[in-house]
């Protein structure tokens, strides 16, 4: 019988559970120290905790609930992990080496129902949400990899941009953030955590009210409703007017800038006309948002899309800059190792189906 991940508890939740089991509240802090500071992989390694408590934890929880299925490493040092969950489902997690530190991109769902027409994640529809423990465990699996192969290095940044829509798994995603930024554990600074959404406006309002002081990224990808609906079906239910209103509320409530992600698709959304339209859409929000222009990673199943020409990418960037919009061109990581989000998972599942 499978057991849930011990990583799914906030420290307050773990303390409450231990008290219910007749244990001391202080044991929660000890357990957290072993999990996140000493980073043990077996409960029996928690040598200063009574055997009765150790057995209780082992009877109810697992430290590892997923196993490494495939690991791909690119020449730039990017590592993509394909993890197999207890129920056999596969998820992706990516370690990226940035100039400012080591960043981990985590997955929040098995599959995705948003259905963006250019994205490999949506090739396989959502099977289920990940628990908060399964999301935290991705970070810990990467950290344990670093402990084994690159001693002294630690995860410094987390981006919630993997497979799935984080705001469609809202409560577990919020618990995940609370856990990884807790100063008694991993102690990740809120400014080093970014959550990306395709634009679930009602959840953006809720997220703003929580004021977690993490970064918010919104997948925009088009400057008008007609084009955005063609490439992102979510725009039918949540058009740009609703999305922009939710974004404005987030900015006002948190006093934080929002990053707008914009994947450039050749001949679709990458021309000067669209750049000017995007600048007009953002208007006087130019100093409250930044646009991250993303080169497209081709996906075989979406062969209607191609990568934009470098000159068009730079021209698009220049238009935004000249209009007073903060913009950047994303540095690519791991292009030669199934870089597109969900690509490795989709490929492995299709291989399995072909064999059966």
Image (cartoon, rainbow, N blue to C red):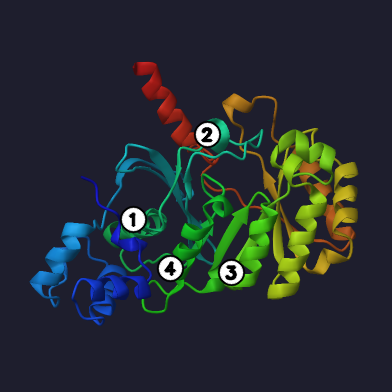
Which type of secondary structure does the marked residue at label 2 adopt? loop
Local crowd size for mark 1, using a 10 Å CA cut-off: few (<14), some (14–19), many (≥20): some
Image position, residue 52 (x, y; %): 10, 70
Residue 44 in view, yes or no: no
Whether label 4 touches label 2, CB < 8 Å: no
Q: Residues within 10 Å of mark 3 (few under 14, many from 20)?
A: some
The residue at the point 39 percent across, 66 percent down is 154
Q: Is residue 266 above or below residue 73?
A: above
- Depth check, front residue: 147 or 211: 211
- Indicate the position of residue 200 as horizontal and vertical percent values: 66, 52
- Label annotation for residue 141: 1
Asked if residue 136 lies left or right of residue 37, the reply is: right
Residue designated by label 4: 180
Which residue is tagged 3? Answer: 214
The image quadrant that residue 187 belongs to is bottom left
As measured in the structure, the alpha-carbon distance from the residue carrying label 4 to the one carrying label 2 is 28 Å
First in residue order: circle 4 vs circle 1: 1
Q: Which residue is mark 2?
A: 125
Residue 248 in sight in this render: yes
Residue 74, compared with residue 48, is above or below; it is above
Along the polypeptide, which appears first: circle 3 or circle 4? 4
Q: Earlier in the sequence, mark 4 or mark 2?
A: 2
């Amino acid at each position: 019988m499978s057991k849930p991940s011990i990583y799914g508890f906030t420290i307050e939740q773990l303390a409450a559970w231990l008290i219910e089991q007749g244990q001391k509240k202080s044991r929660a802090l000890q357990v957290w120290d072993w999990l996140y500071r000493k980073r043990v992989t077996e409960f029996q390694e928690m040598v200063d905790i009574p055997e009765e408590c150790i057995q209780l934890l082992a009877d109810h929880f697992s430290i590892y609930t997923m196993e490494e299925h495939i690991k791909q490493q690119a020449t730039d040092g990017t590592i993509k992990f394909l993890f197999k969950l207890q129920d056999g489902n596969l998820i992706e997690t990516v370690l990226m080496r940035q100039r400012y530190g080591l960043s981990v991109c985590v997955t929040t769902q098995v599959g995705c129902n948003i259905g963006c027409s250019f994205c490999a994640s949506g090739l396989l529809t959502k099977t289920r949400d990940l628990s908060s423990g399964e999301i935290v465990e991705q970070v810990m699996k990467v950290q344990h990899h670093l402990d084994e192969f690159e001693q002294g290095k630690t995860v410094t940044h987390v981006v919630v941009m993997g497979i799935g829509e984080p705001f469609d798994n809202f409560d577990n995603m919020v618990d995940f953030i609370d856990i990884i930024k807790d100063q008694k554990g991993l102690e990740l600074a809120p400014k080093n955590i970014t959550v990306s959404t395709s634009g679930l406006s009602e959840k953006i309002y809720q997220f703003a009210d929580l004021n977690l002081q993490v970064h918010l990224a919104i997948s925009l990808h088009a400057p008008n409703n007609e084009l955005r609906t063609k490439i992102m079906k979510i725009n039918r239910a949540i058009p740009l007017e609703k999305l922009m209103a939710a974004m404005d509320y987030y900015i006002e409530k948190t006093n934080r800038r929002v990053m707008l992600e914009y994947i450039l698709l050749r001949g679709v959304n990458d021309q000067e006309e669209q750049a000017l339209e995007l600048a007009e859409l953002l208007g006087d929000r130019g100093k409250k948002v930044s646009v991250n222009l993303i080169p497209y990673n081709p996906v075989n199943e979406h062969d209607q899309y191609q990568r934009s020409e470098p000159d068009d990418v730079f021209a698009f960037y220049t238009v935004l800059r000249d209009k007073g919009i903060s913009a950047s061109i994303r540095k690519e990581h791991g292009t030669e190792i199934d870089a597109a989000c969900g690509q490795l998972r989709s490929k492995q599942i299709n291989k399995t189906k072909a064999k059966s």
